Structures are given as structure tokens and as C-alpha cells.
Amino acid sequence: VRRAADRVVEGASGGRSVEPREVVARARRAFDTGRTKPRAWRVAQLKALRVLLVDHEADIAAALHADLGKSANEAWVTETGFLVREIDHTLRHLRAWTAPRRVPVPLSLAPGRARVVREPLGVVLVIAPWNYPLQLCLAPLVGALAAGNAVVLKPSELAPATSALLARLVPKHLDPEAVHVVEGAVPETTELLAERFDHVFYTGNGTVGRIVLEAAAVHLTPVTLELGGKSPAYVADDADLPVTARRLVWGKFTNAGQTCVAPDYVMASAETLEKLEPLLVEAIRETFGDDPAASSDYGRIVDARHFERLTGLIDAERVVSGGRSDAATRYIEPTLVEVADPDDPDEAVMRDEIFGPVLPLVPVADLDAAIALVNRRDKPLALYVFTPSTVVRERFVRETSSGAIGFNIPLAHLAVPELPFGGVGASGMGAYHGERSVELFSHAKAVLTMPTRPDTTAWIRPPFTRFKEQVI
Ligand code: NAD
């Protein structure tokens, strides 16, 4: 954690230390000039962000490797390339998404004309976490810029290399008056949250989510909370087990399990678990080799605190496979553990979101028991079901609630830009990506225009008899 005195706040100053309050004031002044509103500005910013990503792909990969041990390929697929696709999709549709939309008026208001005009909210604060420190900082930025806002970005201090890179590159590539990066930890974020924003977009854990929501309430600022929680996976008896095992391993151990939508635990009948276990072990070997520590595709735990937390969850007696770790390099082997009773309060792996490479295997009696287990717990950010049966799939859609459902594939729903990405209940509020981002960061203003002649308002003036006659 950096001392407040050491902080560097980059913006128009290009490196001069500026107080968070002053940064927000600058962003506000930029927005108030109206410069962020024209589509030309928005398009230029999105294109400039694309250039930043493509021109600095190697610098970004190096930062993500320093922070999380991500390989360059993983960095491209899950962060940089993901953002480039989101930008391209947004540029392709921006005109249609932001055009005023005519809507019909009721007969009593004819010949009035009504339309919905999307206007930017103003100054948006984006508070990002460390696990996908580039993607989760810049994907909201894409939407906020596309909607015509000024933006203050607060990257995570737990991914310091990525945070520093963003602070260096963003003011160079984007409009330095309207887009700012404030680096720092709790003190800086607290100072920022004391300011008035027009929207706060927070990604991270629920405890801080509550702090954000409280701070925003003071200014009546709308908030999006992209939170986490335990995302379950259910493997039905009729699932294609070898493919399921491969996809579960990919979904769970990407970024060493530090993915908000990673399958947190796997439920299946005892018989299916018995068949699935060796296939999971084989899939881990196939993906990361005999020694995952030597695989360039296997990441590391972000810091010592999370390393301690995760190794504390691994009970050697319950390990099915893996379990080794190395504190010096913050390496934790892909680990499968068995769970006897998911409702046992002593079952540590079933308490909180794991957020690391430990996969509990949970036996359930049947489909009903799996659905009941999901429904007994907080509404998850994602739920995964592996089965060819449409009947079973539809039961999960109808009988459970979650931010998203992936059938036969984890994680991938967030790469469909037409799908809203967000949680429900404890996993968050609000959703973004694609058009949903533009909706989120703009206000749909109702505009009604009435000609004065002929003056048709007799319908709606007292004594209202004509209106009543017309409606009834
Ligand atoms: P984190 O510790 O990096 O915190 C997120 C942000 O909150 C950081 O910018 C940090 O500076 C700020 N912060 C921390 N403490 C604060 C405080 N007291 N006051 C104000 N700001 C504060 O990230 P994290 O919370 O450890 O992230 C992991 C969690 O985020 C997991 O629960 C995960 O599931 C969730 N997550 C959700 C999504 C999603 O899209 N829904 C994506 C990634 C992670």
C-alpha cells in the first residue's frame, strides 16, 4: 500500500501530483464544456483507446505478468484482445445505440411527437479490482466514453504494474481533461468517494461494495456493483464427461482461479463425481503439463494475503489431487478437494468465494438437491450446468436465480457482447457490456413536443369529461 504522500495522480498534468478532489473537479469542468457530448469525440476516444491497447500490447502483457504471472496469450485473450473486440463492437453500433428514438403518443396527445434522447450522465468513477486489472478498468471506460461521459479511473493497488501503466498511458492517448487515472488504495478511494459523481461503477467484493453504496447515497449517485460470490457448476449424469472436465479445468484454473465467474465448486451425483475426478486430473495434466509450476500458462496468486488465505483452505486429508504450494513464488497447484457435506459450517471451502485454484467436489443426491443447494445460498454471479438435456437446462433457468447461466461452458457468456454482464442479489446490481454499457452510462431522457395549434388540450383539462369519454 502506497503512502498517501507518494501517490501519483495522472491527468492533464501528465505526472504532477494532484489531489483526487482536484482531478474530479477537472473532469467536471471538461464535461461542463460539452466537449464529451458529440459523437465525433466519443468515436475519437474509443479509437485512441484501441490504439493504446494495440500499440502497447507488449507493455500490457509485461505488466499483467508482473502482477499475476499471466502469459502473453492469456493476457490477450482475457484482457487486451477482449477490450479491442468490445471497442470494435461499440464503434460498429454506436450511431444506432445513441440515436434519438421516436416513440408513439396516445391519441389524447395527438398531434404531439415523442422521442427518447440518450444523454451522458456527467462524471463517472470506475473503481477496478486486481484480478483482470486491465479489462475490468477499461471495459466500463468503453461504455462510459461511448455514452459521452468524463471518467475517473481508479485501478487496483493490488495490481501495481498495471495500475502504473494505465496512469502513464491513459493521459497520453485519451483526452487528458476528460479522462483521468487516480492511483492509490483505500485513502485515495475514500477521498474520491467523498466527491460527487454522476455514476459510480465498482467491481470487487461485497464488503467494499457496501462502503461504495453508502458513500454514493450521500450524493444520491447511482451505483453499479459488479460483485462476486460462489458460482456453482452442476454436472448431470448424462453430461459428456471428458469435454466437461476439460472445460471445467479451463474455467477454474484460468488466472489461477482468480476469476469472478470461475466455477467455485462442482456438484454431481457420487457416481458421476467418481467418473469425473480422474478426467479432471487428466485435463489438468493436459492443460498445464506434469508440473503446472513450470507452465507459462499457469498464473500466480496476487499477493501473500490471498496466498495464505487459499493455502489455509486446503485440508491435506481432503485433497484429491494437487495441493502443493510455494510461498516464495505465490504458486498454488491446481487442486481438487472433496467435500462431504456442503452445509457443514466447518467445511471451510464451502463458506466464502474461493477465488483461487481450489475446486471442491460436492456430492448431491440428484438434480433437485443441486437446485435446492443453489437456492439456499446467495444468488451467484454465474451458474454452470453440464447436460445435453433441454428439460434439465430449462429447469435451472426457471427454478434458480443468478447473474448468468452457462450451459456446457463456463466463463464464455461474458464474451458475448449482446449479453448483459452483471449480478443479482449478493452478486451485484446493474449490468454492462455492449449496448447495455451505453444504457448504463446514459440517461434515457423523455422528450415530448406539442404544437400549440390546434390546441387539443381540452381533452386533458378540467372538467376532464372529454378525456373520460375518449378513454372509456
Ligand atoms: P480489490 O481488493 O482490488 O478491491 C477493488 C477496489 O476497491 C480496488 O480499487 C480497491 O482500491 C478498492 N477498495 C478496497 N478497499 C476499499 C475501501 N475500504 N474503501 C474504498 N475502496 C476500497 O479487489 P477485490 O475486492 O479483492 O476483488 C475480488 C472480488 O471481486 C471477488 O469477490 C470477485 O468475485 C469480485 N469480482 C467481480 C467481478 C465482476 O465483474 N462481477 C469481476 C472481478 C472480481
Image (tube, helix red, strand yellow):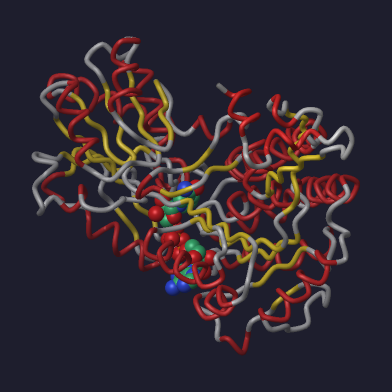
Q: Residue furthest bottom?
A: 5
The quarter of the picture where the C terminus appears is top right
Residue 427 spot, x, y in % from top left = 39, 47
Picture layout, residue 281 above or below residue 217: above
Task: Evaluate whether residue 164 shows in this view.
Answer: yes
Is residue 20 toward the left or the right of residue 345 in the image? right
- Please tell me which residue is depicted at 79% across the width and 52% down the height of the picture: 52
Task: Evaluate whether residue 299 shows in this view.
Answer: no
Is residue 314 toward the left or the right of residue 131 in the image? left
Residue 182 spot, x, y in % from top left = 66, 72
- Please tell me which residue is depicted at 15% across the width and 27% down the height of the picture: 369
Is residue 74 toward the left or the right of residue 399 in the image? right
Residue 319 spot, x, y in % from top left = 18, 43
Where residue 11 sits, quadrant-wise, is bottom right
Is residue 10 toward the left or the right of residue 471 in the image? right
In front: 71, or 135? Answer: 135
Picture layout, residue 458 above or below residue 313: above
